[in-house]
């Protein structure tokens, strides 16, 4: 166990921070760089554990990947030169690596086995397996192909028309990646738009991809071409400090070069709706991804209702938004977020139990939660459930509690934000 006791902080958050590179984009940059012909250079790569699992997988295929801090250089001759991996691929806790790699493995003409840690082994994969089998892939795993460990015998794919049954960018991305290997055209229809990092990056690497009227089409092309990728700061990591500055009196904090992709920036919209003071400056677009500086100044919040189409734009930020809601005037309702139950842990359960242990008034719902604002958080013993976003949410809560917050295990934070506690000390003037 790697527990921590956090003392209540009396310090506002001040100054500026550079948060780590975006996890979603870092994964995709390595995947497409490995599939492409030529050299790919990735800067501001997230060096957390999940993204390292993706690098390790392609190294087993024989791809040359050199890491120098947060800069990654990939030299590849394309997927046609991949070797069958000599041993099973280990994906740790990374659902993104697993689901997107299933799309790639489905197209590779050899057999691969993959597995993960105990948390990943509980996360359902049938939502990805089902469309890949329609394309002709052969996959098998526990419970009829629902859970890892899993085996994939790839090759011989054909393009399909597929309507996403769930609001999941990972499922969409897996099918798009498989479409790179499929005969003909693969067409995906989204009822609700999800994050579009895969589409942006596929274009940057030269894929034959088009979008119109909610449908995305990709056609098998001979090869992708290596390119340079600058990864913006991860808004999901920035969200913890954005929220902290919004709820800790006298705070004024700037997060620099943060990704502002519309499909990910729902937390900004919701906090502004709740009355937060947020300014965005120095906006630019690099490689199809919008980024800029986010400055948050403390201001009292009011409750809101979060539901519908905005949910996919902030699904990973809902635990920290729930913390903000405990400090807002009124009752906040979160619904349509049943996807939270199949993340690294059941995040509805983990969030509501964690906040309740700190003295918040919060009730779980099947698809969300109800949070009564104006709570004085007391502190106490909490459980992170081996989930990086729950651990960081509880750590931010300690900034406003009356007593110590004890988190049972913070090791999961290394998945997405290894420098989290150092940045927290810096922002509160204790670094």
Image (spheres, grey):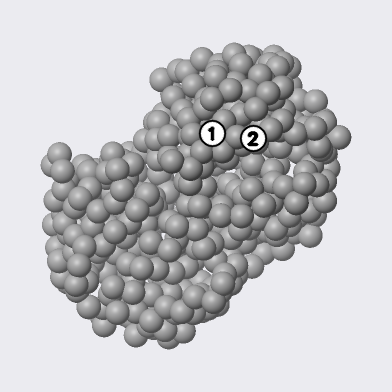
**Residue 52 seen by the camera:** yes
**Residue 210 seen by the camera:** no
Q: In x, y percent, where is residue 393?
A: 59, 35
Disc on res. 192: none
Q: In x, y percent, where is residue 153?
A: 14, 63
Labelled pair 2, 1 in contact (Cβ < 8 Å) = yes
Give the SS element for disc 2: strand
Please name whichever residue, 30 or 164, is drawn nearer the observer in this view of the structure. Answer: 30
- The Cα atoms of the two marked residues, 2 and 1, are separated by 8 Å
Q: Is residue 377 above or below residue 123?
A: above
Disc on res. 6: 2
Q: Is residue 268 left or right of residue 166?
A: right
Q: Is residue 320 above or below residue 204?
A: above
Give the SS element for disc 1: strand
Q: Which residue is mark 1?
A: 407
* Residue drawn where x is 64% and y is 43% of the image: 239
Q: In x, y percent, where is residue 271?
A: 70, 34
**Mark 1 closeness class: few <14, some 14–19, many ≥20 residues within 10 Å:** many
* Residue drawn where x is 70% and y is 17% of the image: 376
Please name whichever residue, 258 or 428, is drawn nearer the observer in this view of the structure. Answer: 428
Asked where in the image residue 157 lies, by quadrant, the reply is bottom left
Q: Earlier in the sequence, mark 2 or mark 1?
A: 2
């Amino acid at each position: 166990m790697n527990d921590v006791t956090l003392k209540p902080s009396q310090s506002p958050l001040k100054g500026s921070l550079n948060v780590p590179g975006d996890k979603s984009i870092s994964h995709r940059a390595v995947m497409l760089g490995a599939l492409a012909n030529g050299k790919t250079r990735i800067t501001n790569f997230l060096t957390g554990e999940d993204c390292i699992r993706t690098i390790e997988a392609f190294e087993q295929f024989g791809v040359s990947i050199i890491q120098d801090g947060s800069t990654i250089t990939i030299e590849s001759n394309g997927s046609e030169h991949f070797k069958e991996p000599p041993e099973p691929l280990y994906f740790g806790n990374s659902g993104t690596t697993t689901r997107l790699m299933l799309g790639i493995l489905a197209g590779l003409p050899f057999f691969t086995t993959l597995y993960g840690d105990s948390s990943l082994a509980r996360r359902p994969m049938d939502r990805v397996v089902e469309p890949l089998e329609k394309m002709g892939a052969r996959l098998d795993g526990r419970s009829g192909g629902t859970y890892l460990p899993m085996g994939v015998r790839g090759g011989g794919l054909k393009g399909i028309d597929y309507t996403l049954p769930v609001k999941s960018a990972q499922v969409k991305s897996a099918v798009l990646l498989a479409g790179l290997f499929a005969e003909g055209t693969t067409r995906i229809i989204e009822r609700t738009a999800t994050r579009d990092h895969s589409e942006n990056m596929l274009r940057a690497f030269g894929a034959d991809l088009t979008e119109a009227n909610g449908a995305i089409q990709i056609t098998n092309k001979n090869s992708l071409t290596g390119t340079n990728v600058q990864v913006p700061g991860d808004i999901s990591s920035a969200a913890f400090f954005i929220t902290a500055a919004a709820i800790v009196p006298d705070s004024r904090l700037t997060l620099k070069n943060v990704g502002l992709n519309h499909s990910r920036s729902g937390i900004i919209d919701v906090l502004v709706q709740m009355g937060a003071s947020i300014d965005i400056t120095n906006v630019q677009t690099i490689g199809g991804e919008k980024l800029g500086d986010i400055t948050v100044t403390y201001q009292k919040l009011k409750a809101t209702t979060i539901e519908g189409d905005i949910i996919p734009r902030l699904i990973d930020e809902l635990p920290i938004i729930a913390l903000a809601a405990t400090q807002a005037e009124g009752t906040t309702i979160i619904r349509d977020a049943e996807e939270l139950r199949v993340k690294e842990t059941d995040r509805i359960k983990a969030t509501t139990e964690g906040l309740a242990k700190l003295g918040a008034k919060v009730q779980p719902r099947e698809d969300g939660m109800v949070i009564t604002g104006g709570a004085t958080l007391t502190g106490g013993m909490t459980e992170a459930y081996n989930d990086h976003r729950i651990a960081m949410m509880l750590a931010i809560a300690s900034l406003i509690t009356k007593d110590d917050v004890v988190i049972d295990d913070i090791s999961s934070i290394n998945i997405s934000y290894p420098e989290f506690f150092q940045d927290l000390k810096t922002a509160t003037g204790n670094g």
